Image (spheres, rainbow, N blue to C red):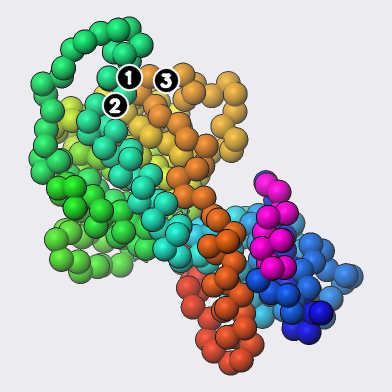
Amino acid sequence: MASKGNILLSVSGFDPGIWRSELEKMAPDRAVVEEPSGPGDPAITYAVVWKQRPGVLNGLPNLKAVFSIGAGVDHIFAEGDVPNVPIVRVVADDLTERMSEFVVWQVLDHHRKGPLYRRQQAQRIWHEDLMQPSAREVTVGILGYGTLGRDAASKLRMLGFRVVGWSRTQKQDQGVETFAGEDGLPRFLGQSDIVVCLLPLTPATRGILAAPMFDRMKKRGPLGAPILINAGRGALQNEADILAALEDRRLGAASLDVFETEPLPIDSPLWTHPGVTITPHAAATSVPAALIPPMIAQMDAHDAGAPLTNLVDREAGY
Ligand code: NDP
Ligand code: OXD
């Protein structure tokens, strides 16, 4: 029996069913609806969204907050006017740990020459590449030293890598040299052998992974040329520039989880490029059973007067 306000669930790009059933399980006292009952539906108090239907959030007089089912919120702003209510994003160990797994996997794969040995295996070639640096000789630079970046950094450091971080505002972190803003970028890039991008997509970061950045990256290093790993957002990267940089060795290789257009078009040259590893926006999946309980807990606490946490700064866009 629904006695609290209704939850509007508006997701596109995948089946909302598992989110709906988890919401219904965890919040039996709230009805879950996928559309307002009509203009100005007064029963809706919270929305849970991923690339919501354009306009669906507008004109809901009792909407108290919008919850993103991911860490990123660019998908919310992309769908036009978003009412001026708080936006809550995912900050959860489950998601963070999944992302760190991905980052560590890709860093180690490049560091330990996975692409080379897979190519050799396909040709039955037995040849040990003796140019194998130790982790201590390799610096991993994390663009976007936030919730995900810091966790990945701590796990990479445990493996022995040197880590540097770049963020919008200056950070202090023991054991990690940190840089901030445009001024800090050249020194960050100049020492990173592997650049891991965990930036949010905002007006300031759109298209940042492009020729001007690749031109400024470290020229030589223990891995030969710098490696790019992007698990932030596809619109952070210029794919034509990545391909050009791979051709002239400004980049040695790239692992891309996100793309300008998703799914990656069948005719994209990235699919077959020997220097590119592709995963289908799978770096850190949002798992309903892990993410819905804290969302419902926040809704209940907020209804009882508590402030919301993990709020998005609308001006900064993340
Ligand atoms: P956070 O907000 O915790 O961290 C973002 C970091 O980026 C912060 O350090 C922030 O700086 C920095 N940043 C933002 N704008 C700029 C800028 N203009 N210049 C320099 N640094 C900047 O986000 P999360 O770590 O939780 O998530 C990051 C992103 O990862 C998400 O927005 C999403 O796009 C992506 N993601 C991808 C997934 C996947 O499966 N591929 C899964 C989950 C997330 P400051 O610290 O100063 O605020
Ligand atoms: C996210 C994502 O933002 O999965 O959480 O991309």
The quadrant in which the N terminus is found is: bottom right
- On the question of residue 250 being in view, the answer is no
The answer to whether mark 1 and mark 3 are in CB contact below 8 A is: no
Task: Give the residue drawn at x 31%, y 59%.
Answer: 151
Q: Which mark is residue 114?
A: 2
Amino acid on which the number 3 mark rests in the picture: His
Task: Give the residue drawn at x 45%, y 45%.
Answer: 283
Amino acid on which the number 1 mark rests in the picture: Arg
Q: Is residue 250 left or right of residue 55?
A: left
The rendered magenta stretch, by its main secondary structure, is classed as helix
Amino acid on which the number 2 mark rests in the picture: Gly
- The residue beneath circle 1 is 118
The answer to whether mark 1 and mark 2 are in CB contact below 8 A is: yes
Mark 3 vs mark 2, foreground winner is 2
- Cα distance between the residues tagged 1 and 2: 6 Å
Q: Residues within 10 Å of mark 1 (few under 14, many from 20)?
A: few
**Residue 24 within the magenta-colored segment of the rendering:** yes
Q: Nearer the viewer, residue 202 or 194?
A: 194
Magenta residue span: 14-25
Give the tally of numbered discs: 3
Q: Is residue 146 left or right of residue 295?
A: left
The answer to whether mark 3 and mark 2 are in CB contact below 8 A is: no
Q: Which mark is residue 177?
A: none
**Of label 3 and label 2, which has the lower sequence position?**
2
Asked if disc 2 is less than 8 Å from ligand 1, the answer is no
Task: Give the percent coordinates (x, y) of residue 164.
Answer: 20, 53
Q: Is residue 140 left or right of residue 16?
A: left
- The residue beneath circle 3 is 273
Q: Residues within 10 Å of mark 3 (few under 14, many from 20)?
A: some
- Cα distance between the residues tagged 1 and 3: 14 Å
